[in-house]
Image (tube, rainbow, N blue to C red):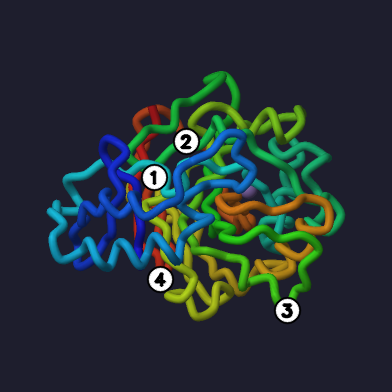
Amino acid sequence: MKICWFNDDRLGVVQEGAVWDVTDALKALPAPTYPNRSGDLALANLPLLQEAIRTQLSQAPSYSADSVRFLSPVANPGKIIGVPVNYQKHVEEARADVATFTNRETGTVIEQGLFLKATSSLIGCAESVRISMPERLTHHEIELAAIIGKRAKDVSEADALSYVAGYSIALDMTVRGAEDRSMRKSVDTYSVLGPWLVTADEIADPQKLQMRLQVNGVDRQVANTSEMIIFVAEQIAWASRFYTLEPGDVIMTGTCEGVGPVVPGDVMQADIEGIGSMKVLVA
Ligand code: MN
């Protein structure tokens, strides 16, 4: 199932090029309580929500997918985890251009560890990436996003994928420079997620997905998730050793080679096999 948030916080299901408004299915969720200790309410109750969505579908109004504004498919993530330099050819391009990437971005994910992005940076694909610090380089990074559906702590690699609710396309937008990643990658609008969440049952193997990012119609990044240095399952197992993962947490699983600058007016198109395609404007 492809689940989205669209327009004015409407809940949708995407089928056959249309978005079906199943917002009434939210009534099936338990009433929110305060304080909330269970992560994103919709992701924490996804099986219940999907059952309610199936019931709603027959009477749901629909819209052409081209006509709606897609918001982030995760409404309330507790954290966004980043996986740096997780494709060998990206390790090599960073190593070959220390002037752009700085010495602290050389080496692989194993040496560098994980990092966090502020949740306030998160947007959907209908919003625009607003360039911060125009005198500096802002790069695009297309990544497979894994979205957690169940609390995970110290999970094994063998069990790790059972904690994934679904997958989306992510753009880990990045100001290049010497500051800590948590500053350069957490600028408002620098985390894009979309266009929807594809539930994990529809992705037979997250390590066999072709991905492509174009800027103004020209290929920049083309790779396959099979080229990751550490796979999604290992990322989840590793992350869960020091972070408790909660429903709605997003893992951006690393970018491939071909990262490059964008400027206001550019149009990024990101595609990942089995998920879909999204266009994101740079403003
Ligand atoms: Mn990245």
- Which residue matches tag 2? 262
Q: Where is residue 229 in the image (x, y as percent from the top left)?
A: 72, 67
Q: How far apart are marks 3 and 1 (CA)?
A: 35 Å
Answer above or below: position of 46 versus 11. below
Label 1 lies in ligand 1 vicinity (Cβ under 8 Å): no
Q: Do the residues labelled 3 and 4 touch (CB within 8 Å)?
A: no
Tag nearer the camera, 4 or 1? 4
Q: Mark 3 points at which residue?
A: 158
In the rendered structure, find residue 268 and report the number of the disc placed on it: 1
How packed is label 1: few (under 14 Cα within 10 Å), some, or many (20 or more)? many
User: SS at mark 3?
Assistant: loop
Q: Is mark 4 on a helix, strand or loop?
A: loop
The first of marks 3 and 4 along the sequence is: 3
Alpha carbon distance from label 4 to label 1: 19 Å
Circle 4 is placed at which residue position? 274
Task: Give the side of residue 177 with respect to residue 257, left or right.
Answer: right
Q: What residue type is labelled 1?
A: Met
Q: Which quadrant, please, contains the C terminus?
A: top left
Q: Nearer the viewer, residue 103 or 151?
A: 151
Q: Residue furthest right?
A: 111
The amino acid type found where label 2 is placed reads Val
> Of discs 2 and 4, which sits in the foreground?
4
